[in-house]
Amino acid sequence: MYLPNTINDTTLIDLPKIEDDRGNLSFVEENQHIPFKIERTYWIYDVPGGQVRGGHAFKEQDEFIVAISGSFNVIVDDGNEKKEFHLNRSYYGLYIPKGLWRQLENFSTNSLAVVLSSTLFDEKDYIRDYPEYLKTKRQ
């Protein structure tokens, strides 16, 4: 298996922002704001200080990550280059296509990350070993 995507395929995407004196509203629509159909949504919260989430790549799954509350960093790695994204607003998110190693860290207190996924959960889709990941990028 060869995973062709690079960090240049990772994109920050602005979401619609409807401003109102009563409070603002943002939303995301599949195949409209993000380039895939949403098959699963999950969220990451109550992350203890200093802990890291992620630390894996997907063979088939694309993701869109939004900081609904608080902030955190997403480090994306394509095997040759790494790039760090700081997410701290609920009106934009990070699109990460399949085949890229990702890690979430530096969570602020009470942060909430929402992840929209292009696939249902499948443990076989994960690459959790970094040396194995590097082999898939070089094949």
Image (cartoon, rainbow, N blue to C red):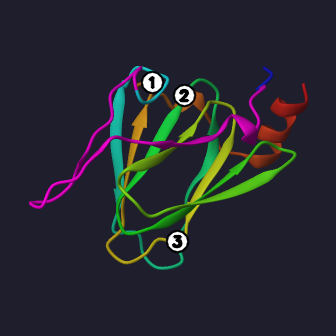
User: Residue reaching furthest left?
Assistant: 22
Disc 1 vs disc 2: Cβ atoms closer than 8 Å?
A: yes
Viewer-proximal residue among 126 and 29: 29
Name the residue rendered at 41%, 20% in the picture: 31
The image quadrant of residue 96 is top right
At mark 2, the secondary structure is: loop
Q: Kindly identify the amino acid type of the residue bearing the numbered disc 1.
A: Thr
Residue 54 placement (x, y as % from top left): 56, 52
> Crowdedness of circle 1 by 10 Å Cα count: few (<14), some, many (20+)?
some
Viewer-proximal residue among 70 and 23: 23
Magenta run includes residue 8: yes
Q: Give how far apart the Cα atoms at labels 1 and 2 are.
A: 6 Å
Residue 82 placement (x, y as % from top left): 77, 53
Magenta part of the chain:
4-32
Residue 1 placement (x, y as % from top left): 78, 20
Q: Kindly identify the amino acid type of the residue bearing the numbered disc 3.
A: Gln
Viewer-proximal residue among 23 and 135: 23
Q: Kindly identify the amino acid type of the residue bearing the numbered disc 2.
A: Gln
Q: Mark 1 — residue?
A: 119
